[in-house]
Amino acid sequence: MGTVTGVNPDERCPCRSGDTLGDCCGRYLASAGGAPAPTAQALMRSRYSAFAVGDAEHLLDTWHPSTRPVGPDLDPDRRWLHLSIESCSRGGPFDIDGEVEFTAVYRDPAGRGELRERSRFVRENGRWYYVDGDLG
């Protein structure tokens, strides 16, 4: 696995799957060569992990071109604490779209906060992409 500065593939994955980063989201991160995530949920988890480790390249590479921003907003003062997947619909290896609802908990200088979103994904040419989401 390639590395993002200060990231150890043997440490617990930020998505809290219970696996190491190298055995979980790390294999999908741009710093590791960016293997395609097999499901929308796997991509959601890897995108959360990318925020946690600062892998902006992965975030941009997995953002659908129709909605991709110029650059992701990675706040160096925000520390991502944990991710909870609330629900998934579609998004399997043979689907063309899917939704993942999640809650991501963080801490920044203002204190502890939560980001809740129902994210939409599409699969094109065998790759899943984040399209957009509704904050909740």
Image (tube, rainbow, N blue to C red):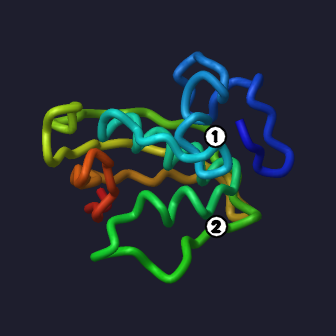
Locate residue 55, reporting x and y percent.
65, 56
Q: Quadrant of residue 86?
A: top left
Q: Secondary structure at mark 2?
A: loop
Compared with residue 9, is residue 44 higher up or lower down, i.e. above or below?
A: below
Image quadrant holding the N terminus, namely top right
User: In the displayed image of the protein, which residue is found farthest to the top?
Assistant: 18
Image quadrant holding the C terminus, namely bottom left
Locate residue 82, reporting x and y percent.
57, 36
Mark number for residue 111?
A: none
Tell which circle, 1 or 2, labels the residue nearer the N-terminal end: 2
Q: Nearer the viewer, mark 1 or mark 2?
A: 2
Using a 10 Å C-alpha cutoff, classify the residue at mark 2 as few (fewer than 14 neighbours), some (14 to 19) or many (20 or more).
Answer: some
Q: Which residue is mark 1?
A: 81
- Mark 1–mark 2 distance (CA, rounded to whole Å): 15 Å
Q: Is residue 89 left or right of residue 53?
A: left
Locate residue 69, reporting x and y percent.
44, 79
Q: Secondary structure at mark 1?
A: strand
Q: Which residue is mark 2?
A: 74
* Residue ID at (61%, 49%): 106
* Residue ID at (53%, 40%): 28
Q: Are marks 1 and 2 in contact (CB under 8 Å)?
A: no
User: In the displayed image of the protein, which residue is found farthest to the right?
Assistant: 6
* Residue ID at (64%, 67%): 74
Q: How many marks?
A: 2
Compared with residue 81, is residue 30 higher up or lower down, i.e. above or below?
A: below
- Residue type at mark 2 is Leu
Q: Quadrant of residue 16?
A: top right
Q: Quadrant of residue 27?
A: top right
